[in-house]
Image (cartoon, rainbow, N blue to C red):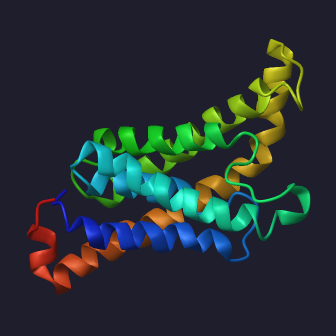
């Protein structure tokens, strides 16, 4: 995949992150898609992880202190379990180039599936590992994953839709502005 201007890519990632502020079904967000897109579109190993994490952090701070403010005590940067979400997003960004090294619909769909599975496995492991909701046993871990299955369809739907928008938008922008598709970052 040709690399584009990192500022343009960051704007797309930031817009995807800000979409979390709009009403949506549980887990139907652009989180996995923005990590997948950033990981595949950027060649710089630090930026491909950092930019999706920055977008996640910005929206987390807004959500923590507006939507979820009633359950917080004072200004909140990180919610309990945030580390696992951040690890999941960083993992998706790092794995993205392995699946999407050349842009195609099939690779974006496969990458979206991978992003959803990685997020599901890591974030729910974190929910179990916190020891708050589930017993720290194999049965507790299994119960945690089973309880999360209903949310997986929304995660997958969001990842596929938003990956299509991000990768498709970037591709179309490259057709309209050929220099954008040729700039190395």
Q: Residue at x 75, y 24 (%)?
A: 129
Residue 120 to residue 106: above or below? above
130 left or right of 116?
right
* Residue 119 x %, y %: 59, 42
> Residue 159, can we see it?
no
Going by the picture, which residue comes out furthest to the top?
A: 137
Q: Residue at x 36, y 44 (%)?
A: 96
Question: Where, quadrant-wise, is the N terminus in this rendering?
Answer: bottom left
Residue 170, relative to residue 121: is it above or below?
Answer: below
Quadrant in the rendering for residue 52: bottom left
* Front residue of 64 and 162: 64
Report the side of 150 relative to 27 (left or right). Answer: right
Total number of numbered discs in the rendering:
0
Q: Is residue 162 above or below residue 100?
A: below
* Percent of width and height locating residue 41: 27, 57
**What is the quadrant of the C terminus in the image?**
bottom left
Q: In front here: 130 or 149?
A: 130
Q: Quadrant of residue 84?
A: top right
Residue 150 in view (yes/no)? yes
Q: Name which residue lies at 27% across and 43% down.
A: 45
Residue 108 in the figure: left or right of residue 2:
right
Which residue sits furthest front?
A: 74
- Asked whether, in this view, residue 28 is left or right of residue 171, the answer is right
What is the x, y in percent for residue 86? 56, 43
Which of the 4 image quadrants contains residue 158? bottom right
């Amino acid at each position: 995949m040709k690399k584009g201007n990192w500022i343009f890519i960051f704007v797309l990632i930031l817009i995807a992150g800000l979409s979390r502020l709009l009403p949506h079904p549980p887990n139907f967000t652009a989180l996995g898609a923005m990590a997948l897109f950033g990981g595949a579109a950027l060649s710089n190993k630090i930026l491909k992880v950092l930019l999706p994490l920055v977008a996640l952090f910005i929206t987390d701070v807004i959500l923590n202190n507006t939507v979820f403010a009633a359950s917080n005590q004072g200004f909140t940067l990180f919610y309990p379990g945030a580390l696992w979400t951040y690890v999941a997003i960083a993992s998706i960004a790092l794995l993205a180039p392995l699946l999407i090294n050349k842009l195609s619909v099939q690779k974006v769909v496969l990458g979206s599936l991978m992003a959803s599975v990685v997020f599901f496995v890591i974030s729910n492991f974190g929910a179990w590992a916190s020891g708050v909701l589930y017993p720290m046993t194999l049965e507790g871990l299994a119960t945690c994953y089973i309880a999360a299955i209903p949310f997986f369809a929304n995660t997958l739907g969001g990842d596929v839709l938003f990956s299509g928008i991000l990768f498709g938008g970037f591709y179309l922008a490259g057709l309209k502005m050929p220099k954008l598709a040729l700039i190395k970052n």
